[in-house]
Amino acid sequence: MGLNKKSVDDINVKGRRVLVRCDFNVPLKNGEITDETRIVAALPTIKKLIGDGGKVILCSHLGKVKNGPNEGESLAPVAKRLSEKLGKEVKFISDYNVTGADATAAVAAMNEGDVVLLQNTRFRGKEETKPEEAGDAFAKELADLADDYVCDAFGSAHRAHASVAGVTKFITEKGGSNVVGYLMQKEIDFLGNAVENPVRPFVAILGGAKVADKLNVINTLLEKCDTLIIGGGMAYTFLKAKGYEIGKSLLDDTKIDYCKEMMEKAEKAGKKLLLPIDTVCIDDFPNPIDDPSISTTIVDADKIPADKEGADIGPKTIALYADAVKSAKTVVWNGPMGVFENPVLATGTKEVAKALSETSATTIIGGGDSAAAVNQLGYADKMSHISTGGGASLEFLEGKKLPGVYAADNR
Ligand code: 3PG
Ligand code: MG
């Protein structure tokens, strides 16, 4: 898909202050970054701006920040790791106010090619509110620090937040440019091509717990793909809609009619809609979720006992899905096939990842849990593209306009 937006290649940043919104929302354990994918993915744009003599002011959110600013959600570990990756100092502004005197002074002292990282944008709270409420004030303060703005936060591009989209109007007001970075371009090229211009057969695989979270993406992908594969918790609502008994399996009972509608839609359009034909059942949901001693039984999908609950796809289903992937030319995957946090119930998700690693098709992993699964299993190198966005890639696949993309200047 040609993205008709200005990019970092279209502006001259020499000597200019450039505010770059990244998605540095990385997982942390005891203050240590456990997956640096999003940091690595941001490097090409940052290096380009440094090389061109820009004064690079980075910003990002981290976590949900439900209880106000706190050291546990500080971006300090990101500054450290980023500095190692770039091989140069990343000056971290630890002030919980994000903007303000410290940030202003640090920016004023910057030389060409210097890099500053602001504190977690969500520490301002207002970040998450609608621009007309108070986000505008914060957006303006961010814009005041810079001359131009680069959005490279694909993972956050579905959020109409101050630092993602709100800031652009103030940059425009002062005559600056709003552009997208290389990561945004790459993500949109892969995801956009897959849905708008796929080499066929195009197989889409959707998993995850709830039908309600995937309503629009099921509908949209059904129109675009040749085969739609459903796994994960949401498959049981489809099985129920087929008239099967599903025991204690996850059921979205307000979505049964929707599932029927989707099955009819597939039928009419001559699309294949694949559902599990067998399932791994458990007596009760594991507690803790990763309890390895949980016992399982495998039954056909139309024979789930009343007192059991489906928790993964079974071996026949794995074979069916792997076969569909084998003959595909384009595959998009979002969402696990079962309770993959549990080693006993992760087989379906692992085997789908393996099938994708072995196909010659273009394989696109739509972020979130499926990306984590692929990374954990060591298949990352075997995939054509692993999105850094979870919610963002899903909304993109739904055909929604992402605020972080559309706020950029047109070419
Ligand atoms: C993500 O990890 O999904 C992105 O960084 C967006 O985070 P959010 O869902 O908290 O807005
Ligand atoms: Mg999210």
Image (tube, rainbow, N blue to C red):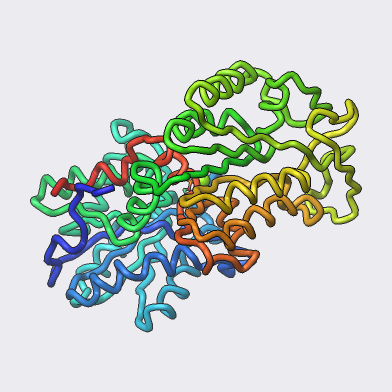
- Eyeballing the image, is 194 above or below 82? above
- Eyeballing the image, is 306 above or below 298? above
Please give the name of the residue rendered at 51% of the width and 53% of the height, measured from the top-left corner: 365
For residue 324, side relative to residue 147 (left or right): right
The answer to which of 99 and 319 lies nearer the viewer is 319
For residue 258, side relative to residue 296 (left or right): left
The answer to which of 324 and 278 lies nearer the viewer is 324
Q: Quadrant of residue 398?
A: top left
Q: Residue 244's spot in the image, x, y percent?
A: 77, 22
Q: Quadrant of residue 127?
A: top left
The answer to which of 40 and 133 lies nearer the viewer is 40
Q: Residue 63's spot in the image, x, y percent?
A: 52, 52
Please give the name of the residue rendered at 61% of the width and 19% of the height, measured from the top-left corner: 260
- Eyeballing the image, is 363 above or below 283? below
The answer to whether residue 366 is seen in the rendering is no
Please give the name of the residue rendered at 35% of the width and 46% of the height, measured from the top-left corner: 192
Q: Residue furthest left?
A: 175
Please give the name of the residue rendered at 40% of the width and 49% of the height, measured from the top-left corner: 199
- Eyeballing the image, is 11 above or below 341? below
Q: Residue 373's spot in the image, x, y percent?
A: 63, 57
For residue 148, side relative to residue 362 (left or right): left
Figure label count = 0
Q: Residue furthest bottom?
A: 87
Q: Residue 201's spot in the image, x, y percent?
A: 47, 45
The answer to which of 343 and 23 lies nearer the viewer is 343
The answer to whether residue 166 is seen in the rendering is yes
